[in-house]
């Protein structure tokens, strides 16, 4: 739902969403200036407002950061674009997942290409891997990082030290890839 709040004498429009999966309050500032807050389903809306007040300095710094790029709001992830890149992304994901699995002994079940709004990939407990169709638009080393990241969840279903150790064994330069991927998100997602 669309909401408004006044922070530091400035009116901020934001989208509030309640999620049954959320365990904590999450705040996101998108490249086009949109602000989104996700709260656990059982939280009252006042918690979101309190969180925005606590994070107002950070919020305005992120908005200012994105404004320097003059990013225009565009029709994101159109159906035509998804159809155009879905098969390419699927072939890439299957080929690279099989490649890494052959060397490192991963066993995955199925690969699906989706139009997720905030994730490059995900892994289910039954071994299904999901990837955003825009991995087809990434440089190969970043697509590999996403695929390796999700494959490693097949062995460690969390983001513990053991998980990152597995990622590092396959991609020693994964920290740089993570940083680079965050910058790509601003332009692609």
Image: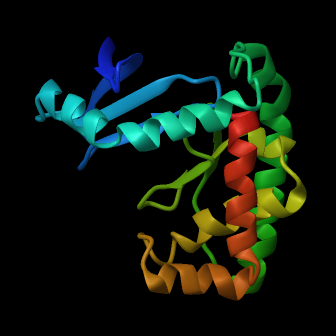
In this rendering, would 58 be left or right of 186? left
Up-down relation of residue 155 to residue 147 (above or below): below
Viewer-closest of 18 and 110: 18
Residue lying at 48% horizontally and 86% vertically, measured from the top left:
162
Viewer-closest of 172 and 60: 60
In this rendering, would 166 be left or right of 184? left
Q: Where is residue 141 in the image (x, y as percent from the top left)?
A: 85, 64
On-image quarter of the N terminus: top left
Q: Position of residue 11 (x, y in %)?
A: 38, 14
Residue 162 seen: yes
Q: Where is residue 154 in the image (x, y as percent from the top left)?
A: 52, 71
On-image quarter of the C terminus: top right
User: Which of the 4 image quadrants contains residue 75?
Assistant: top right
User: Which of the 4 image quadrants contains residue 170?
Assistant: bottom right
Up-down relation of residue 28 to residue 3 (above or below): below
Q: Total number of numbered labels?
A: 0
Q: Residue furthest front?
A: 9
In this rendering, would 140 be left or right of 105? right
């Amino acid at each position: 739902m669309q909401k408004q709040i006044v922070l530091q004498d400035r009116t901020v429009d934001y989208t509030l969403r309640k999620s049954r999966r959320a365990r904590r309050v999450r705040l996101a500032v998108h490249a086009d200036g949109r602000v989104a807050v996700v709260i656990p389903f059982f939280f009252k809306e006042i918690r979101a407002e309190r969180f925005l007040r606590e994070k107002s300095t950070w919020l305005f710094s992120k908005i200012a950061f994105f404004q320097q790029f003059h990013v225009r709001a565009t029709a994101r992830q159109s159906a035509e674009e998804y159809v155009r890149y879905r098969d390419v992304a699927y072939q890439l994901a299957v080929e690279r997942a099989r490649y890494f699995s052959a060397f490192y002994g991963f066993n995955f079940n199925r690969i699906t290409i989706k139009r997720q709004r905030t994730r490059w990939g995900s892994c289910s407990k039954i071994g299904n891997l999901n990837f955003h169709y825009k991995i087809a638009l990434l440089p190969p080393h970043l697509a590999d990082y996403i695929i390796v990241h999700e494959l490693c969840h097949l062995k460690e279903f969390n983001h513990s030290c053991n998980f990152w150790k597995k990622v590092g064994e396959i991609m020693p330069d994964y920290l740089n890839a993570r940083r680079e991927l965050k910058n790509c998100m601003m332009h692609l997602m």
